[in-house]
Image (cartoon, helix red, strand yellow):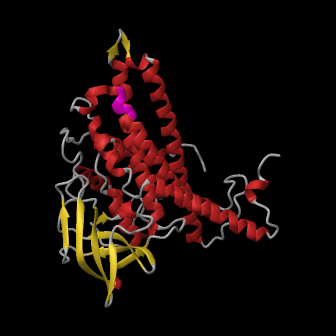
Amino acid sequence: MDLTPDPLLVQLRKAVRGSLAALPVRPEVHGAPVADGASGPARTVLDRLGADGFERPAAAGGLDLGLTAGVLVSEELGRAARGNPYRADALAADVGGPPGAALAGLEALPAGTGITARPRDGGWELTGTVTVDDPEAGRPLLVATRTDAGPVLVAVPAGAPGVRVDGGCWPPAVRFEATPVTAADVVGSLDDAPAGPLARARLRQAAYLLGIADGAHEIAVRYAGTRRQFDTRLRDLPAVAFPLARAMVALRATRAAVYRGAWLVDAAHDRTATGEVADAAGGTEGLGSVDAAAGTAPVVALATAAETARDVVRLCMQSCGVRAMTTELGLHRYFRLAAAESSRYGEPAALWRLAGAARLDRARRAVGENGAGRSVVAAGRPG
């Protein structure tokens, strides 16, 4: 992985950040903190910048900047405390789903049990209540559920029977009551393929959470540098300065995990596209091939980012005191976003269990391939 900043991505970040900074915000301390979905202000910025073409291959008329560009866009949306319409468009493009769709039910992953799919002739009936990205009714939905084939993404057309969107709560929810879908409505499986749609979606969400934490931290540091208590600045007090410094370390570690994951997924995708066979990465990755390392990197990045967002935003609220809960600083928007988004793609504890199980399974397979029963981990342990 090349750690040198890409000049193109640097310019892209400046363009996205500058455009989002010019948008009005929702200062209210109650209700939804952002205007999400197709009618939200962030959607206008993304359309003007042509964000839908950032990840699209050049053969399809896109810029072919890879997942790293999508991760960057998601991070900047979180940093500005905006809604994230980009993730739905990007996932729909990955699986060939309907354009303009909203995502629903991803918080139940990896189990995929938020929506019950009861078998019926030619398909299933969907029943259950899950969160949805866009509170507007009348939009097609991409719903995560579980069938006999495992977790899948099902396209539910606008106006389907038994679908009711509740935009009066935060986060917004959608209810299904015996909504019929057919096998043709399954647009893709949500497996753990190294460069699959789910891995890419997890990294975009991880970047969004990273941005939420980073934006809150920036506000807290700025406020602590101007607010005075006991005749000194807040950030000069060790009780305030040290936790904020530790939060900065956590943010940098999370950013490294997110962008390393994006690089691994892009590398695995490039190797698949060119027909290359993954070879051992040796000391570079230390866990086998690039494809094997990419297998758990998205899950680890998402779990790390979710925990970082919760911890850092809570710390920032505490550092700024009561003003964090008013319209003066706007930190309450980050707090409510972190509360809703940190479990949008699954609880961190479930993600850690998933990553641990995958690594244990990989270690067992390596032991079996060695044939001598020697553990790869034990072999690398210093004597």
Position in image of residue 336 (x %, y %): 29, 44
Residue 294 sits above or below residue 304 on the image: below
204, above or below 194, in the image = above
Q: Nearer the viewer, residue 325 or 285?
A: 325
Residue projecting furthest to the top: 231
Work out whether 20 lies above or below 242: below
In this view of the protein, which residue sits in the foreground, 195 or 251? 251
At x 66%, y 62%, the residue is 289
Q: Position of residue 273 (x, y in %)?
A: 55, 70
Q: Name the residue at the bottom extreme.
A: 121
Q: Identify the main secondary structure in magenta.
A: helix
Q: Is 23 placed left or right of 117 in the picture?
A: left
Q: Quadrant of residue 134?
A: bottom left
Q: Is the residue 72 above or below the residue 314 in the image?
A: below
Which quadrant of the figure has residue 314? top left
Answer left or right for 359 relative to 219: right
Percent across and percent down for residue 6 are 51, 46
**Position of residue 237 in the picture relative to residue 177 (left or right):** right
Q: Please state the horizontal and vertical placement of residue 13, each as a whole percent of the image.
A: 40, 44
Q: Which residue is rendered at x = 39% and y = 33% of the image?
A: 315
Tell me if I can see residue 267 in this picture. Answer: no
Comparing 31 with 203, the one in front is 31
Of residue 320 and residue 202, the one placed in the foreground of this image is 320
Residue at image point 69% right, 60% down? 288
- Magenta residue check for 342: no
Magenta part of the protein: which range?
315-319
Q: Is 316 one of the magenta-colored residues?
A: yes
Report if residue 157 is visible in the image: yes
